[in-house]
Image (cartoon, rainbow, N blue to C red):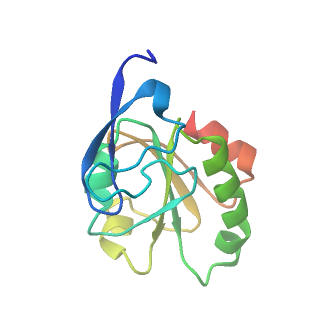
Amino acid sequence: MNTSEALHVACAHCGALNRVPAARLADDPACGRCGEAVLSGEPVELTDANFDTVVGKTDLPVVVDFWAPWCGPCRMMAPAFEQAAGQLKGRALLVKVNSDDNPRTAGRFAIRSIPTLVRLDHGREVTRRSGALPAGQIVALAG
């Protein structure tokens, strides 16, 4: 990636599209509309309502963790997913979708077991892995 180019990153909080210089992706850029962090290095919760806006308009790779609160392996993987989000800060966006609360998005991706991780580029599925993964494999999945 050319460090002089700018990438688009959609704000998960308000949906605004932000242009972020590539050289500043790891510098905690804030949304120009609402002021919230757009690339904080932490997983972002998405819903049926904001999934397409954030994922479809973000130029960075997006790794989606489809999970549910009752799922033991999901809870076991959560710290590794958070660790991977920190390691990938400025290089990928890691998001979580509660498949019970967001059945439209989970259904669209034909989620049959959780946790399932799906890597998307500009909203298109590139790869997926089911089952709990350690942080290193999550980072590798983000490419």
Q: Is residue 95 above or below residue 100?
A: above
Q: Is residue 105 above or below residue 32?
A: below
Instruction: Indicate the position of residue 126 as horizontal and vertical percent values.
Output: 44, 38
Instruction: Indicate the position of residue 70 as horizontal and vertical percent values.
Output: 61, 84
Q: Is residue 79 left or right of residue 119?
A: right
Q: Nearer the viewer, residue 40 or 97?
A: 40
Q: Is residue 47 above or below residue 39?
A: below
Q: Is residue 92 above or below residue 13?
A: above
Residue displayed at 54% across by 77% down: 68
Q: Nearer the viewer, residue 81 or 120?
A: 81
Residue displayed at 65% across by 60% down: 131
Residue displayed at 29% across by 63% down: 50
Q: Residue furthest bottom?
A: 70
> What number of labels is visible?
0
Instruction: Indicate the position of residue 32 as horizontal and vertical percent values.
Output: 29, 48
Q: Quadrant of the C terminus?
A: top right
Residue displayed at 67% across by 66% down: 78
Instruction: Indicate the position of residue 35 as horizontal and vertical percent values.
Output: 36, 56
